Image (cartoon, rainbow, N blue to C red):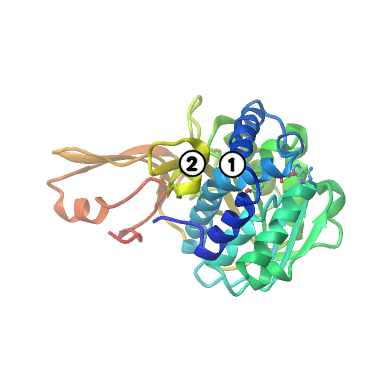
């Protein structure tokens, strides 16, 4: 499945980015990328309007696609869930909010918290220009996370691409606080890197200990079986817009965004898959093979012989990241 920015949001980004000089945006993008690669926070990386424009044109489409993929995998397991309110922690330009609104347009109450005023201004402006009414009426709170928790709550609480900016020894406490604010669903999405995975594992342990119900991606509550130095992650392909290609001086018309996520629910009935694909499926003349994280907590290489026609047909369209049910994945062939 592909998750492109909705046309009104893409147009709003284009308007905002076009208000900056193109060469300056390209120059700042190189700096922004260096800052993020070196582990600096957005406070350092996003310091000027051109930095915001660089983020919007080069990073927001990818983080949007990753959040949509994570939300969509989560929604598959809780199809009856229909949230009305959303709290976007470390919201940046509102990426996770826009993604959640595209999947659950019924969300009407929206709160965005971030410490960076340039990002919050961009979120407000994108909401206005794109005409997304929940974003136009959203509450924007400029605050450090630690001072923002009191008094907030929502059906869905999300934090995307932000744990990497928080001190490692504070992650578990932030996860617990965020869980307390969630009336139903809490979702973290992080870059699909060893560092992102490390932080996701800290949240996983902290919230399982709190008794939170882990919806996705893990089909079990056992210790994560992914052997070091491997790290669990998925990838989401996205088409690059003309602006995206120009700013990045990229040749290809698409990119693959690696991401990892974690979804916890409180009360809603969720479906229980028998496993989840944690690698690309490889098809040869004789067989189909893929890594499967199973509901018994084991990570196995599942092999399906082509001569086992009925099973092969059921599984041949299984993709990396899919939940597997006894009758196969639920994705469209
Ligand atoms: C890489 S950006 C991600 C923004 C957005 N969630 C997205 O997915 O595009 C990380 C965001 O976390 C915010 N942030 C980092 N530490 C924070 C803190 N302690 N309190 C509030 N916001 C914080 C930054 O200002 C920045 O907007």
Judged from the image, the secondary structure of the residue bearing numbered disc 2 is helix
The spot of residue 318 in percent (x, y) is 31, 51
In the rendered structure, find residue 22 and report the number of the disc placed on it: 1
The spot of residue 176 in percent (x, y) is 75, 49
Q: Quadrant of the C terminus?
A: bottom left
The spot of residue 265 in percent (x, y) is 62, 60
The number of callouts visible is 2
Judged from the image, the secondary structure of the residue bearing numbered disc 1 is helix
Residue 28 lies in what quarter of the image?
top right
Q: Is residue 85 at all visible to an observer of this figure? A: no
Query: For the residues carrying marks 2 and 1, which lies nearer the camera in this image?
Result: 1
In the picture, measured across the screen, residue 262 lies left or right of residue 318, that is: right
- Residue drawn where x is 51% and y is 37% of the image: 248
Residue 106 lies in what quarter of the image?
bottom right
Neighbor class of circle 1 (other Cα within 10 Å; few <14, some 14-19, many 20+) is some
- Residue drawn where x is 37% and y is 37% of the image: 300
In the rendered structure, find residue 246 and report the number of the disc placed on it: 2
The answer to which of marks 2 and 1 sits earlier in the sequence is 1
Callout 2 touching callout 1 (CB < 8 Å):
yes
Does the beta carbon at disc 2 come under 8 Å from ligand 1? Answer: no
- Residue drawn where x is 61% and y is 28% of the image: 37
Residue 222 lies in what quarter of the image?
top right
Image: 83 above or below 260: below
């Amino acid at each position: 499945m592909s998750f492109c920015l909705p046309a009104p949001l893409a147009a709003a980004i284009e308007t905002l980015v076009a208000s900056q000089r193109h060469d300056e945006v390209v120059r700042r993008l190189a700096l922004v990328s260096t800052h993020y690669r070196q582990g600096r926070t957005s406070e350092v990386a996003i310091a000027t309007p051109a930095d915001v424009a660089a983020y919007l044109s080069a990073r927001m489409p990818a983080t949007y696609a990753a959040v949509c993929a994570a939300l969509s995998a989560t929604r598959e397991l809780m199809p009856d869930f229909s949230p009305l309110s959303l709290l976007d922690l470390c919201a940046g330009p509102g990426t996770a909010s826009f993604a959640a609104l595209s999947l659950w347009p019924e969300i009407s109450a929206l709160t965005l918290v971030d410490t960076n005023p340039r990002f919050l201004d961009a979120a407000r402006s994108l909401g206005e220009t794109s005409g997304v009414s929940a974003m136009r009426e959203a509450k924007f709170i400029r605050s450090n996370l630690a001072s923002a928790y009191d008094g907030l709550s929502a059906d869905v609480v999300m934090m995307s691409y932000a744990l990497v900016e928080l001190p490692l020894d504070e992650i578990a406490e932030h996860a617990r606080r965020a869980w307390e604010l969630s009336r139903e669903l809490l979702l973290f999405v992080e870059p699909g890197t060893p560092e992102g995975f490390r932080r996701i594992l800290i949240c996983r342990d902290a919230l399982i200990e709190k008794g939170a119900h882990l919806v996705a991606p893990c089909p079990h509550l056992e210790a994560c079986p992914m052997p070091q130095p491997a790290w669990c992650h998925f990838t989401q392909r996205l088409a690059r817009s003309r602006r995206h290609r120009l700013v990045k001086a990229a040749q290809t018309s698409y990119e693959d965004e690696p991401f990892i996520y974690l979804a916890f629910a409180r009360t809603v009935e969720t479906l229980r898959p028998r496993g989840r694909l944690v690698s690309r499926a490889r098809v040869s003349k004789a067989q189909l093979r893929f890594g499967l994280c199973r509901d018994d907590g084991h990570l196995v290489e599942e092999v399906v012989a082509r001569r086992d026609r009925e099973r092969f047909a059921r599984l041949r369209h299984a993709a990396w990241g899919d939940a597997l049910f006894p009758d196969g994945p639920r994705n469209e062939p």
